[in-house]
Image (tube, rainbow, N blue to C red):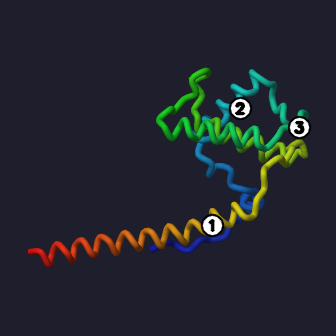
Amino acid sequence: MNAPVTPPTNPKQIYGDKKPPLAYIPMSAQLAELEAFVDGMFKYGPLNWRTNPVEAMTYIEAAFRHLQLYKVGEELTRDTLVKNLGAVRACCGIIIDSAAHGTLIDNRPKSQVEADLLYAGEEWMARLKQCQVDRERLKTDAFIKGL
């Protein structure tokens, strides 16, 4: 049984407990992202997206490419050996940070129809899974009748 939580008495802890707990972001993920940011810093300059506007789709496409490379088994980029998943995180970080600093050019092809279609996929996935359960049950029933 868990002991009751007592409120903190240290004033620094009381103040600190109001802050976002940044320690919950895994260090391994932070370092993979940082490695990609450092690679980009050497190529393009540090935090360049804060002074030079960037297009959202440039980083969305780059993130997709790095994610696809990871999906097919490529842990590292071929040119600088940066972790592909770290590069995905860095691409997302640039989009978030440039939006926060007002330098994001939002050129996404926005479509409520496509968003709705994606959410509707949950319905057809559930239907198809149920169809498969029913097919398996029919196979089992037919097998049992054949015995």
Q: Amino acid at mark 2?
A: Phe
Q: Is the residue under label 2 in contact with that under label 3 (CB below 8 Å)?
A: no
CA–CA distance between discs 3 and 1? 32 Å
Q: Position of residue 97 (x, y in %)?
A: 80, 44
Q: Residue at x 73, y 27 (%)?
A: 40
Q: Secondary structure at mark 2?
A: helix
Q: Position of residue 141 (x, y in %)?
A: 21, 77
Q: Position of residue 6 (x, y in %)?
A: 62, 71
Task: Identify the mark nearer the N-term, 3 or 1.
Answer: 3
Q: Amino acid at mark 1?
A: Tyr
Mark 3, mark 1: which one is toward the viewer?
1
Task: Identify the mark nearer the N-term, 3 or 2.
Answer: 2
Q: Secondary structure at mark 3?
A: loop
Instruction: Count how many numbered circles sit on residues in the image.
Output: 3
Q: Residue at x 50, y 32 (%)?
A: 74
Q: Residue at x 88, y 45 (%)?
A: 101
Q: Quadrant of the N terminus?
A: bottom left
Disc number at residue 37? 2
Task: Identify the mark nearer the N-term, 1 or 2.
Answer: 2
Residue matched to label 1: 119
Q: Quadrant of the C terminus?
A: bottom left
CA–CA distance between discs 1 and 2? 33 Å
Residue matched to label 3: 53
Q: Secondary structure at mark 1?
A: helix
The crowd level at tag 2 (other Cα within 10 Å; few <14, some 14-19, many 20+) is many
Mark 3, mark 2: which one is toward the viewer?
3
